[in-house]
């Protein structure tokens, strides 16, 4: 079945550094790839997403890249701040449907 | 705008008991989802619905049932609670395919 692998599981950076989280997916029909941020005790919140017809998307300090041939997509956070500390999840659609399969998450810690 | 509302926030069940986790959204979204989140395992899709009267199994449907009699509500039923169902449950909704999923605050369920 559909699978999404996410690495690393934990990531510690200094404030101002960049952070990169990588995901791979198995279903070549997947066409939507969102990233969610989850803070302690809360539900996940969308931070950025990318569709299969786009290779890269940027929103201020956050960018996502997609390589459909290799079935890889990555989240890049530049100039990290302590408030970026959270758990980040990548996800991909079940084929061309709307239901999402999530990676296992990356705990990002930004120290000042 | 309340978004996605889940009740209860916390619940302790004894093995073999049953309960219903409530989920309602006020955004007139067609698509609704139930996920469970276990430590280090990301979010696993239990059931989803693409509209009133239509439901479908996700990755881990065993031990659960759902119904979708209205657009707003998508309750999740546990018939015979087992310790393996101890988890945090999240309900989510989307307005259409491949758009932002809005999550509720979660229900923390413990089965003892």
Image: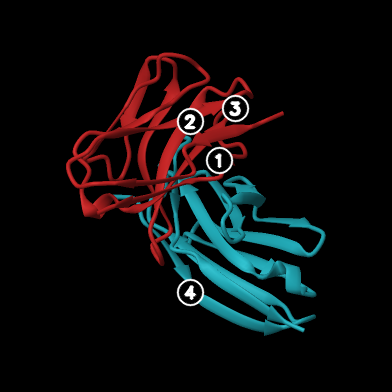
Q: Which of B84 and B51 lies nearest the eye of the viewer?
A: B84
Which of the marked residues, 1 or 3, is nearer the chain's N terminus? Answer: 3
Q: Which residue is mark 3?
A: B95
In the displayed structure, would residue B50 be above or below residue A87?
above
Q: CA distance from mark 4 to mark 2?
A: 30 Å
At 74% from the left and 68% from the top, the residue drawn is A83
Q: Which residue is mark 2?
A: B23
Q: CA distance from mark 1 to mark 2?
A: 8 Å
Q: Which is more foreground, mark 1 or mark 3? A: 1
At 23% from the left and 46% from the top, the residue drawn is B14
Q: Chain of mark 2?
A: B
- The tint of chain B in the picture is red
Chain letter corresponding to the colour cyan: A
Image coordinates for residue B64, horizontal then vertical, percent: 26, 36
Q: Which of B41 and A5 lies nearest the eye of the viewer?
A: B41
Judged from the image, the secondary structure of the residue bearing numbered disc 4 is: loop
Q: Chain of mark 3?
A: B
Q: Mark 3 Cα within 10 Å, few/some/many (few <14, many 20+)?
A: some
Q: Mark 2 Cα within 10 Å, few/some/many (few <14, many 20+)?
A: many
Q: Which residue is mark 4?
A: A9
Marks 4 & 2, CB-CB < 8 Å contact? no
Marks 1 & 2, CB-CB < 8 Å contact? yes
Marks 1 & 4, CB-CB < 8 Å contact? no
Image coordinates for residue B112, horizontal then vertical, percent: 24, 54
Judged from the image, the secondary structure of the residue bearing numbered disc 2 is: strand
Marks 2 & 3, CB-CB < 8 Å contact? no
Q: Which residue is mark 1?
A: B104
Image coordinates for residue B36, horizontal then vertical, percent: 39, 48
Marks 4 & 3, CB-CB < 8 Å contact? no
Judged from the image, the secondary structure of the residue bearing numbered disc 3 is: loop
């Amino acid at each position: 079945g559909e699978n999404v692998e996410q690495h690393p599981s934990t990531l510690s950076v200094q404030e101002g550094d960049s952070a990169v989280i990588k995901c791979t997916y198995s279903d070549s029909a997947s066409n939507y790839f969102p990233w969610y941020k989850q803070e302690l005790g809360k539900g996940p919140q969308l931070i950025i997403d990318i569709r299969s017809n786009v290779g890269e998307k940027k929103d201020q300090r956050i960018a996502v890249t997609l390589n459909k041939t290799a079935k890889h997509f990555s989240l890049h956070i530049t100039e990290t701040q302590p408030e970026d500390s959270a758990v980040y999840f990548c996800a991909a659609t079940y084929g061309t449907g709307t239901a999402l399969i999530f990676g296992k998450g990356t705990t990002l810690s930004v120290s000042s | 705008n309340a978004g996605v509302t889940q009740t209860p926030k916390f619940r302790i069940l004894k093995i073999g008991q049953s309960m219903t986790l409530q989920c309602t959204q006020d955004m007139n979204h067609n698509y609704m989802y139930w996920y469970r989140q276990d430590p280090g395992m990301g979010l696993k899709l239990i059931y989803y619905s693409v509209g009133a009267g239509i439901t479908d199994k996700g990755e881990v449907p065993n031990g659960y049932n759902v119904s979708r009699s209205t657009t707003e509500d998508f309750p999740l039923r546990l018939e015979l609670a087992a310790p393996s169902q101890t988890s945090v449950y999240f309900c989510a909704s989307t307005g259409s395919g491949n758009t932002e999923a809005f999550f509720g605050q979660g229900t923390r369920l413990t089965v003892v």
